[in-house]
Amino acid sequence: MGKKLMAVLFGLLMLAMPLAVGQVSAASTTTVILVSDNAADKAIAEYLANITGAVVVTTTWGTYDPNVTAEILSYAPSQVIIIGGPDAVVEEYVTDLESYNITVYRWWGANRYETDLAVIGNASKVLGIKFNSSVVVAGNDSLAIQMALQLAVQNKAAIIYVNSTTNVSRIMKELGVKEMVMVQSRVSEKLMRKVAEQVRECNCTAKEVTANVTKEQVERVMEHVRERLMALEEIANMTNSTALKEQVREMVKLMEQVNQSLQSGNYTMAYQLALKLQVMTEFALKDAHMEFMKCMERNEAFKFEIELQKIEAQIQVLEKAGVNVSTVTPLLEQLKTAIQNGNYREAKFLLKEIKKLIHELYRNDMDTIREHGSKKDRH
């Protein structure tokens, strides 16, 4: 299910400057940032939202959820910026949104480090954001990333994710900043010592901040892991994939080790294992999406059930905004009957007609939908 964050600082000012993905419209009214629940990508999305006033909608990494598309439509955005590659935020969302004539841009790189730099570059060129300093943090240290986000927002600093191969000196030079805060936890101390050596070489001013690993913080990371495992289990059951079910079982065993470490008071070990689980879930979710797409291709009943979920979620958005959907309701009931009876030829025809109608309703009532979306975020 999509999760949103409405920032409250400024309206989004989109300057008409070129991007690798095209141009962002200067006439924007509502912008949604779509991002996966990957801690690194999500932090830079939330940072961008705090600066621009955009809305953040989150999807589980590597999965397609019709409710996420519906969540985005509930804001009637004129454009959507996707942060992250197609493994993280799958292409099905792009197809959904473009069918509503919503302009979609994807800011991304081959990994979280390159995605981060792509967002920094676009934030500077397209949004005209000037960074005062930088906050440097290990790209796989979720707790340190959350602290880095807070510091970056406070100081209007660029968040720079690093690993063992990152050239920090070069990035600082390209950004034109000399001041940085290095954020670390116990699991990233060794890496950040390497960063400190580069800082001395680039003659930059650095301050070190440590994020303490607590039981409560590890439990929050584990809650995120559990949510991903639930998504994996759901896809495994839908697709009847024994391979996915086996991956889930392996990760459940590792979760038990995390709990044992927590009980013994070894929070650092528990956190290291939790981070390992986060990586494992992403690999598994990528496999799960492939299984999901294969199932869609070979199983017409499954495909139509997903399509039914999608349009029901979208119709619900229209209804909640006060749009009259009485023209769609009879066709929807006919579609359900056709799917139930296995009459897929009729179902295909009805699906096409329903989509045409709800797209028309959406276009005609965008202002009403947008106003409703704005009000729900104020509550």
Image (spheres, helix red, strand yellow):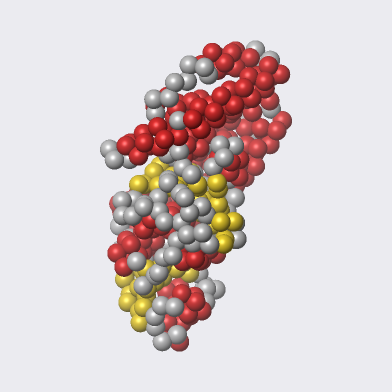
158 and 15: which is toward the camera: 15
Q: Quadrant of residue 203?
A: bottom left
Q: Position of residue 64 (x, y in %)?
A: 55, 39
| Residue at screen point 43% across, 45% down | 30
| Residue at screen point 32% across, 37% down | 375
Q: Quadrant of residue 200?
A: bottom left
Q: From the viewer's perspective, is residue 157 above or below residue 74?
A: below
> Can you see residue 365?
yes
Q: Position of residue 319 (x, y in %)?
A: 42, 24
| Residue at screen point 48% across, 44% down | 78
Q: Quadrant of residue 238?
A: top right
148 lies left or right of 304 = left
60 and 34: which is toward the camera: 34
Point out the residue furthest to the left here: 379
* Image quarter in which the N terminus is found: top left
345 lies left or right of 7 = right
Q: From the viewer's perspective, is residue 34 above or below residue 71?
A: below
Q: Position of residue 247 (x, y in %)?
A: 57, 44
Q: Position of residue 36 (x, y in %)?
A: 49, 49
